[in-house]
Image (spheres, grey):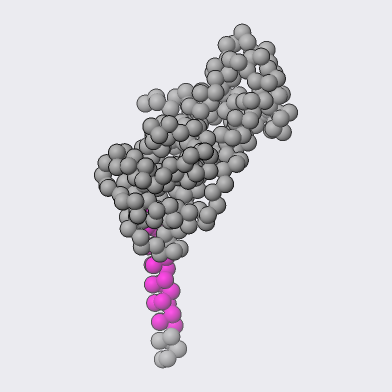
């Protein structure tokens, strides 16, 4: 009798544990999906904010990396593991996410700008661009600490795709006259578009491959066909150790996305 009671109790506990785990996983999926639905608006918000603040491209792409490649994938797991109850995380509204976007810009600016943004100037800017919620200076400071905790204070951005692409672009212009026709703005436009969707943003996990493929994509789009005398694929293979087939496949994928991203 006692044995049966213990077995029954154990079964009940196992079922309860499973139900709790299932509930947590469901909440995690729902929260991740909810953030995913806001992705394009948050990308546009970040790009527009760095433009209005007149910050250099390295700040924009470092912030995109910090927020979308690191904070966004890890914040849901952080909430589940840490049982965080701070109001900036519960719930993760669009306004709260916009605040964390500004935090990613602020951290990036601290790393790459000679004169960083002060918290008061960032707060004043936030008052203008975040329309659904008014945040205090204290909220910005709290949000920065939360952001850093989610990233486990790992904020290095030396090997992001943008810096590798910039290095490749400089090298290319040094060895090829046709480099004068290569449009770096087109490279950055492609990088921006690739962040808009979850599936294409996964390319940013492979910074070197992405940088090389964007350079070749821009070459195809912006260099006049009569100037196609430079052997760009062999050159890319030489400087990156990537196989030409891999570059060609990735270029095709990138162009199919960026050229038809606004198609119905």
Above or below, 212 against 26 in this view is above
- Residue extending farthest to the right is 238
Return the x and y of residue 62 as percentages of the image width and height.
51, 40
Lateral position of residue 152 relative to residue 25, left or right: right
Residue 18: say if magenta.
yes
Q: Quadrant of residue 53?
A: top left
Return the x and y of residue 151 as percentages of the image width and height.
50, 53
What residue is shown at x 37% (from left), y 43% (from top)?
Answer: 122
What residue is shown at x 35% (from left), y 60% (from top)?
Answer: 86
Magenta segment range? 7-31
Q: Quadrant of residue 262?
A: top left
Residue 192: say if magenta.
no
Q: For the C terminus, which image quadrant?
A: top left
Return the x and y of residue 18 as percentages of the image width and height.
42, 68
Return the x and y of residue 167 as percentages of the image width and height.
63, 30
Assign the magenta stretch its main secondary structure: helix
The number of numbered badges drawn on the structure is 0
- Residue extending farthest to the bottom is 1
Above or below, 8 against 44 in this view is below
What residue is shown at x 40% (from left), y 82% (from top)?
Answer: 9
Q: In this view of the protein, can residue 113 be seen by the observer?
A: yes
Above or below, 218 against 147 in this view is above
What residue is shown at x 63% (from left), y 18% (from top)?
Answer: 179
Q: In this view of the protein, can residue 29 be seen by the observer?
A: no
Lateral position of residue 196 relative to residue 254, left or right: left
Q: For the N terminus, which image quadrant?
A: bottom left
Lateral position of residue 241 relative to residue 107, left or right: right
């Amino acid at each position: 009798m006692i044995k049966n009671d213990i077995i029954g109790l154990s079964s009940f506990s196992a079922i309860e544990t499973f139900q709790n785990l299932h509930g947590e996983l469901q909440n995690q999926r729902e929260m991740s999906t909810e953030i995913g639905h806001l992705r394009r608006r948050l990308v546009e918000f970040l790009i527009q904010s760095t433009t209005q603040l007149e910050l250099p491209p390295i700040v924009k792409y470092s912030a995109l990396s910090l927020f979308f490649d690191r904070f966004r994938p890890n914040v849901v797991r952080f909430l589940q593991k840490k049982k965080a109850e701070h109001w900036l995380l519960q719930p993760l509204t669009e306004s709260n996410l916009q605040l964390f976007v500004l935090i990613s810009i602020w951290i990036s600016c601290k790393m790459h700008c000679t004169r960083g943004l002060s918290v008061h100037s960032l707060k004043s800017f936030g008052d203008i661009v975040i329309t659904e919620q008014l945040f205090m200076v204290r909220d910005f400071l709290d949000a920065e600490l939360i952001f850093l905790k989610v990233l486990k204070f790992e904020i290095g951005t030396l090997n992001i795709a943008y810096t590798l692409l910039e290095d490749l672009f400089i090298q290319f212009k040094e060895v090829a006259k046709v480099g004068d026709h290569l449009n770096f703005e087109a490279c950055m436009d492609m990088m921006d578009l690739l962040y808009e969707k979850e599936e294409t943003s996964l390319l940013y996990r492979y910074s070197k491959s992405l940088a090389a493929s964007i350079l070749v994509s821009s070459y195809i789009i912006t260099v006049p066909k009569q100037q196609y005398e430079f052997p760009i694929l062999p050159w890319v293979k030489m400087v990156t150790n990537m196989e030409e087939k891999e570059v060609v496949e990735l270029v095709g994928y990138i162009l199919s996305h960026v050229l038809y991203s606004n198609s119905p």
